[in-house]
Image (tube, grey):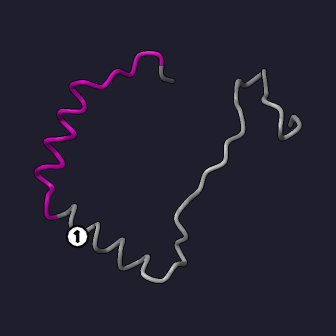
Amino acid sequence: MNHPKKSSSKTALRRVTLCVVDTKRPGFAAECRRQALRVSRHRGSERRVLRELEVVMDLDGWT
């Protein structure tokens, strides 16, 4: 592999850094449950929004 700070011209990839939630943080599991319950109560709305997104999404040029 190329040097980590250089992009690879062969694959057209570049290195990125992501920050993610600390899953070991106190309260993380409770917050996940809270959000999951909230989503499950609004499943019909979720389906409607997903259908609307499918209508307007443009996937041309994505691989």
Q: Residues within 10 Å of mark 1 (few under 14, many from 20)?
A: few
The three-letter amino acid code for the residue at tag 1 is Leu
Q: Position of residue 32 (x, y in %)?
A: 36, 71
Q: Position of residue 7 (x, y in %)?
A: 78, 30
Residue 52 part of the magenta-drawn span? yes
Mark 1 lies on residue: 37
* Of the pair 25 and 42, the residue shown nearer to us: 25
Q: Secondary structure at mark 1?
A: helix
Rendered position, 27 above or below 38:
below
Residue at horizontal 24%, vertical 30%?
54
Residue 14's quadrant in the figure? top right
Rendered position, 24 above or below 38:
below
Q: Left of 20 or right of it: where is 53? A: left
- From the image, give the main secondary structure of the stretch colored magenta: helix
Q: Residue furthest bottom?
A: 26
* Of the pair 63 and 5, the residue shown nearer to us: 5
Q: Residue furthest left?
A: 44
Residue at horizontal 29%, vertical 67%?
35
Q: Left of 33 or right of it: where is 26? A: right
Q: Left of 7 or right of it: where is 32? A: left
Q: Position of residue 53 (x, y in %)?
A: 24, 33
Rendered position, 10 above or below 18:
above
Placement of the N terminus among the 4 image quadrants: top right
- The part of the chain drawn in magenta is 41-61
Residue at horizontal 44%, vertical 76%?
28
Residue at horizontal 41%, vertical 78%?
29
